Image: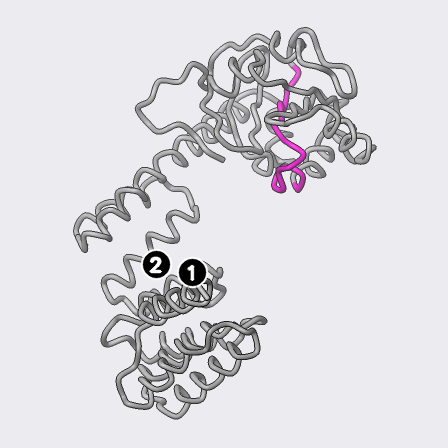
């Protein structure tokens, strides 16, 4: 989900009245598209596209909410946006059948919905959900954030509903702010300004929202300050991006803890698919761990894997030779050698 940056002026914000005209004038694909907001009804206006994987993944969740809560005051309208042709949408909806049982409308380029909703709210990515009641935009969210529990609270109304709406608006704004803090943090990281990094991280923590941006900031700060214990904890159940960040930082760092090196090597060795570069990473980390024999073996595995793939083996031969000579080649140098070798082969 992408939101406009803080400080920008939005034409459509939570709490604003919003007419239904742009929806009712859109081309219906299936079901009845309402011509007016029904008082008290809770509307989920779901923006999606046939080419959008996350949108398609969210459809069963939205359909389940519709099937379960339609008779209790929930309405769902699927708005097919940013498509190149109407026929694709028709075919997709037909194939989904009962798996997408709510009303769906097709949004053309330069339509009123695109201008009055998407552009007005600075929507830059989908899936994106608008939640409306009594003609008022309550909040915007990712469809998976609309849990059954939250929908039940919103349908019940009263103080609990108002509290939830306030919290969901806070979360949406926090998502905007945390991206800003992350951008500041990365600028400080490039400048090796640990004080500024800490300030941005603390500001992000204060937003009280977990996100991939915050996880990256925590990890990068731990690595920059050589807090190896915290960095090692992130390897308990790492994402690929987390592992690669640690590998790239640890490979060029000094005085890395044995525990972090050991856990990083274990995660690399546990990968289901290991390329030549993966073995080179393992080799370099084993060297830093003091396991010279293991490092040489891994370098040999890297070379053997590359020869099987048909890529230029020279960079890996250089890598293995440098290791044997006691002067390991950095991963950055290996990458440059690989790029040079690939260009040389293309010219032949």
Asked where in the image residue 68 lies, by quadrant, the reply is top right
Q: Position of residue 90 (x, y in %)?
A: 77, 26
In this rendered view, identify the residue nearer to me: 99 or 71: 99
Left or right: residue 200 versus residue 98 is: left
Cα gap from disc 2 to disc 1, whole angstroms: 8 Å
Q: Which residue is mark 1?
A: 242
Seen at 64% across and 31% down, the residue is 49
- Range of residues picked out in magenta: 41-57
Q: Secondary structure at mark 1?
A: helix
Left or right: residue 60 versus residue 190 is: right
Seen at 34% across and 58% down, the residue is 219
Among the two numbered marks 2 and 1 on one chain, the one whose residue lies closer to the N terminus: 2
Seen at 50% across and 25% down, the residue is 165
Q: Please determine whether, in this image, residue 158 is positioned above or below residue 241.
A: above
Asked where in the image residue 166 lies, by quadrant, the reply is top left
In this rendered view, identify the residue nearer to me: 254 or 238: 254
Marks 2,1: beta carbons within 8 A: yes
Q: Position of residue 61 (x, y in %)?
A: 68, 38
Seen at 52% across and 13% down, the residue is 116
Q: Position of residue 224 (x, y in %)?
A: 25, 61
């Amino acid at each position: 989900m992408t939101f406009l940056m803080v400080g920008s002026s939005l034409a459509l914000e939570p709490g604003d009245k919003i007419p239904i005209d742009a929806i009712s004038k859109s081309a219906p694909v299936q079901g009845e598209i309402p011509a007016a907001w029904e008082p008290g009804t809770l509307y989920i206006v779901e923006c999606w596209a046939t080419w959008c994987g996350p949108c398609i993944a969210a459809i069963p969740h939205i359909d389940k909410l519709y099937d379960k809560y339609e008779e209790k005051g929930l309405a769902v309208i699927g708005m097919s946006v940013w498509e190149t042709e109407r026929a694709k949408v028709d075919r997709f909806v037909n194939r989904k059948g009962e798996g997408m049982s709510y009303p769906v409308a097709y949004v053309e380029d330069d339509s009123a919905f695109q201008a009055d909703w998407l552009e007005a709210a600075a929507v830059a990515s989908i899936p994106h959900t608008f939640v409306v009641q009594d003609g008022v935009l309550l909040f915007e969210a990712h469809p998976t954030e609309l849990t059954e529990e939250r929908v039940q609270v919103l349908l019940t109304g009263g103080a609990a509903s108002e509290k939830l709406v306030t919290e969901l608006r806070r979360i949406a704004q926090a998502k905007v702010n945390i991206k800003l803090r992350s951008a500041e943090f990365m600028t400080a990281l490039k400048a090796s300004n640990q004080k500024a990094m800490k300030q941005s991280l603390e500001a992000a923590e204060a937003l009280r929202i977990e996100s991939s941006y915050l996880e990256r900031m925590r990890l990068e700060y731990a690595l920059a300050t050589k807090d190896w214990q915290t960095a090692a904890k992130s390897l308990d159940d790492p994402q690929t991006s987390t592992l690669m960040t640690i590998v790239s930082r640890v490979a060029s760092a000094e005085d890395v803890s044995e525990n972090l090196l050991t856990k990083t090597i274990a995660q690399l060795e546990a990968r289901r698919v290991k390329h030549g570069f993966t073995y080179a990473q393992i080799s370099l980390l084993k060297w830093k761990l003091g396991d010279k024999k293991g490092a040489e073996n891994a370098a040999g595995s890297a070379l053997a894997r590359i020869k099987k793939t048909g890529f230029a083996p020279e960079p890996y031969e250089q890598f293995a030779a440098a290791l044997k000579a006691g002067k390991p080649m950095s991963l950055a140098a290996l990458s440059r050698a690989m790029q040079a070798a690939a260009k040389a082969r293309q010219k032949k």
